Image (cartoon, grey):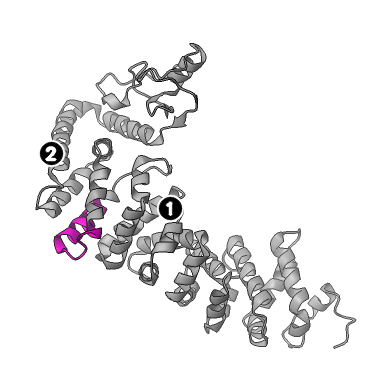
Amino acid sequence: MEMEKNPPMDFPQDFRCPISMELMKDPVTISTGVTYERKNIERWFGTYKKKICPATMQCIESLDMTPNHTLKRLILAWRNAQSGDQSCSSSSAGRHSIKHDELMTLLGTIESTPFKVSCLKKLKSILEMGDEIKADFMISGGVEVLVRIILQILVESSDFITFRACEEALDALQLLPFSEDEDDEAIQLLMKPECMKSMAIMLQRGSAEARFCTISIFQKIAKADYHWNYVAQDQGIEFYKSLLEIISDEICTKASSCALQVLLGILDASKKSRLKAIEAGAVCTLIELLPDSNRSKCEKIMQLIKLICECADGRLAFIEHELGIAAMSKKLLNVSEAATKIGVKIVWLLCNFHSTERVLEELLVCGAVKRLVALLHISGRSNTKDRVVKIFKLHSRRWRRYPCFPSELKDYLGLENESS
């Protein structure tokens, strides 16, 4: 099937392949940093046996090519915008040209003007016009400008205007369609320690809207496989308290969901972060949210509790909470296979490291043991089922003294002939 023809219209120079000068569909970047249409540069290297960059004429040692996902996304956004309304193409082009000029003017003056807040509000209203103008903004270095404004809070943290400008810059940033590729230049800028530190400050001290913008950006960074070690090393207890406060927000469920995902990424990356979260009160917050959580939220909360219970301090905090074992036990077999699997891991950790009489009795009374028995009746073999068997082999001799211990389990475990 013949490839779709390029639109019969002018398109940005950056969207052209330097070899064919046509609109790129599958842009790739070579070792010199220049981007080409994949089939053209492959032909250059393969068919023509060239080992120089066509644009820079530099000798190339490596013929590796890296997909330029950011540029591809911007080209697609531009094409969609162009094909959106052909009947109004001339007037749309005129409006876009005007908005483009206005955007360029704002970018040129926004850092030097004393009226940053009003300029940033105006910028946001332009960005809200659609993907095409957002693509223009990103290609023109707009993300770099916003990041520089955000970084000012590290220098002038007590200045009200600087603080408000930072909030507005974050509001504009969260509108942008960042790629989930960690090589995306915009994502790379946001991942820098100074920028993460600035956003962490806003998460703790910003308005409700600014905190939501910040957590939304954090979630986009998390999707790009950001390694949260910096946060674990540099951020104090207040950072984790701010995250937990957002997770507990019943008004803005979207912010709560974003914060849960971000906290999961942070705790999964570092045991040091888990200790800080425990100190910030994570165990109490998560246990109290668990009973009324939906499936997706429950799975995330259970996973967070499991990560926390991998630390001695976390297990201690969990068993000392009056509702901890009861809330977790009720979720076994009642939410999803994933939640049950995580729940069994939590029970395993408790039974291995905190097998006190009180903990074992509470697991029995709250129904965890009964649900573990039900798991043994599921056909087939699994790691979860194997773990349940190990739990019973460790503690069934103590549980069977209680009247509520299932009698059929004695046969299953070969306890019927043992003396009491």
Extreme residue toward the right, this view: 417
Quick check: 389 above or below 185? below
- The residue drawn where x is 25% and y is 65% is 206
What amino acid type is highlighted by mark number 2?
Thr
Residue where numbered disc 2 is placed: 105
Query: Which amino acid type corresponds to the residue marked 1 in the rendered image?
Result: Ala
Q: Position of residue 222 (x, y in %)?
A: 43, 53
Vertical position of residue 407 compared to residue 186: above or below: below
* 16 horizontally vs 88: left or right: right
Decide: few, some or many residues near mark 1? Use Cα within 10 Å; few <14, some 14-19, many ≥20. Answer: many
Mark 2 and mark 1 residues within 8 Å of each other at the beta carbon: no
Q: Residue at x 45, y 71 (%)?
A: 276
Vertical relation: 78 (above or below) 9 = below
Which numbered disc covers residue 222? 1
Q: Residue at x 21, y 27 (%)?
A: 87
Q: Nearer the viewer, residue 159 or 14?
A: 159
Answer yes or no: is residue 128 visible: no
Q: Earlier in the sequence, mark 2 or mark 1?
A: 2
Q: From the viewer's perspective, tell me whether residue 167 is left or right of residue 307.
A: left
Q: Quadrant of residue 82?
A: top left
Q: Quadrant of residue 93?
A: top left
Q: Is residue 298 magenta?
A: no
Residue 154 falls within the magenta-colored stretch: yes
Q: Is residue 375 visible?
A: yes
Residues shaded magenta = 153-172
| Residue plotted at (10% across, 52% down) | 115
Disc 2 secondary structure class: helix
